Structures are given as structure tokens and as C-alpha cells.
Amino acid sequence: MNNLTFSFIVTTIAGLSTLLGMIPVFFKIKNTKNIINAALAFASGVMLSVSIFSLLPESINLLSQKYSTLGIILLTIIFALVGIFLASLIDKIFKKIDNKLYKLGIINCLALMIHNIPEGILTFSTTTTNVSLGITLALSIMFHNIPEGISISIPIYYSTKSKLKAFIYTFISGASELLGAVITYIFLYKYIDFTFISITLALTFGIMSYISLWELLPNALSYQNKKLTYLAFILGFIFMIFFK
């Protein structure tokens, strides 16, 4: 097996691990509000933790190899804000959807697609140059892709009662990581540098921070069990500190 084929396989496995987030859908739970509440809060904690402790530091680290402190600050802030803007734009586009839970699932799916494409680019390009580092990165991505899958499958399933729709939306989000690998192989393989990767990381930081703080957490807090919300959020946040 050559290195490129192996890189595609690693990226595909990392992306499709998102489907593991569908597991809660197949269990019969009496109090559905609690599972929705806990799932959204946990996913919110995971995304915020990944953003703060993984995406942002790695973006800054890569930029530091080429830019001054001022350049690092400016580029990070600019592209983080662009990420926030893109996520808020998606939110506004689907604002007319009456079912808030269904809307949340769609927003998460689209926003995570934007996140997963550069993540696929990063995983594929890293694995082709350093297999050991690529596998380590893929394992880290798998851990945070699972709660990302939860953040899509749970809202979609409980708003539509359709396992198929939950699967389709979750699959699309995860498969977009492979799309990132394909884009890299066809167009970007020779042109990817530290600046490109760091910018995509800063962009993703903005997107995921927005989803965590302006979508997932507020929706979780809309349920009555605030203690469960905060507990699940903290557990998700701490969970990814160990698996970032």
C-alpha cells in the first residue's frame, strides 16, 4: 500500500467516525429531553475545548514560524472573525425554520462540513508527509468527531423521528473530511504550506466557537435541567483536554 492510499484511508476513517455519534439514537430513552439536553451540552463543551486547546494554539504555532507577533495576532483575529461570520451567516439563512431542533441539526451539519473539509486537508497532508503524526492527528480527530456526530444526529432524529435522516446528515458531515483529502490531492497538494494550514485552523476556531457558544449551549440551556446542562458541558470540555 503506497503512502497516498494509506493517507486516504486514514482520513476516511477519521471522518466517518462521526457516525459513531449516532449510537444514542438507537437506544430507547424515556426522558428524551434529558438526552437532548445532555448531548447538546456535551458537544458544546467538546467543541469549545477543541477550539481553545487545539485549533487556536496550533494555528498560532504554525504562524510563528513565518510571521511576527503582530502578524500572528492580526491573521488569527481576522480569520477567526471570518469563521464566526460564516457560522452566523448559515444561522441567518436557516432562521425561518420553525423547528429549532431541526434547524440546529442542519446548522451543525453545514458548519461542521466547513470545519471538516480543512480538517481533511490537514489530516491528508500531514499523513502523506509524516505517517506517525498523521495517525496521531487522526485519532484525536476521531475522538472529537463522535460528539460532533451527536450534535447533528440527536437534533435531527428527535425533530424528525427519522434514523435515516439522522444518518444522512451525519454521514454528509463526516464524508466532507474525505472531500478535503480529494481537494488536496487534486488541487492543493503542491501548494499547502504552514500559512494555509494555520489560516484554516483559525477559520475553524471561529466556526466551532460560534456553534458551541451561540447555538449548542443556548439550546441546551433552553431545557429545564440546568444542572445536567452544566455538568454535561464541563464533562465535554474536560474530555477533550485529555484527547486533543
Image (cartoon, rainbow, N blue to C red):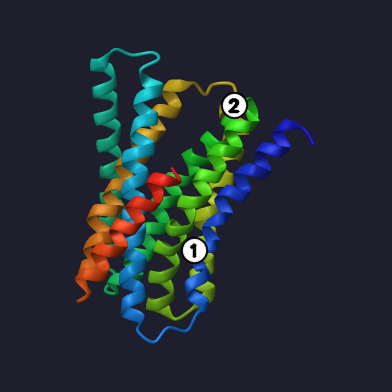
Q: Earlier in the sequence, mark 2 or mark 1?
A: 1
Across and down, in percent, residue 18 comes to: 52, 57
Q: In this picture, is 155 found above or below 216?
A: below
Front residue of 225 and 21: 225
Image quadrant in which the C terminus is located: top left
| Residue 146 position (above or below residue 165) | above
Between marks 2 and 1 in the image, the one whose residue lies nearer the viewer? 1
Residue 189's disc is 2
Residue 47, relative to residue 36: is it above or below? above
Q: Could you say which is closer to the camera, residue 77 or residue 48?
A: 48
Specify the quadrant of the image occupied by residue 195: top left
User: In the image, 49: left or right of 143?
Assistant: left
**Dot 2 crowding, Cα within 10 Å, few <14, some 14–19, many 20+:** some
Residue beneath the point at 48% across and 78% down: 162
Q: Position of residue 11 (x, y in %)?
A: 60, 43
Q: Of the residues shown, which amino acid type is indicated by label 1?
A: Gly
Residue at 33% x, 64% y: name it.
Answer: 40
Q: Is residue 60 visible?
A: yes
The residue shown at (41%, 70%) is 154
Q: Is residue 93 visible from the viewing direction of this image?
A: no
Identify which residue, 230 or 196, lies in the foreground.
230
Q: Which residue is mark 1?
A: 21
Q: Which image quarter holds the N terminus?
A: top right
Q: Is residue 144 left or right of residue 237?
A: right
Q: Amino acid at mark 2?
A: Tyr
Element at label 1:
helix
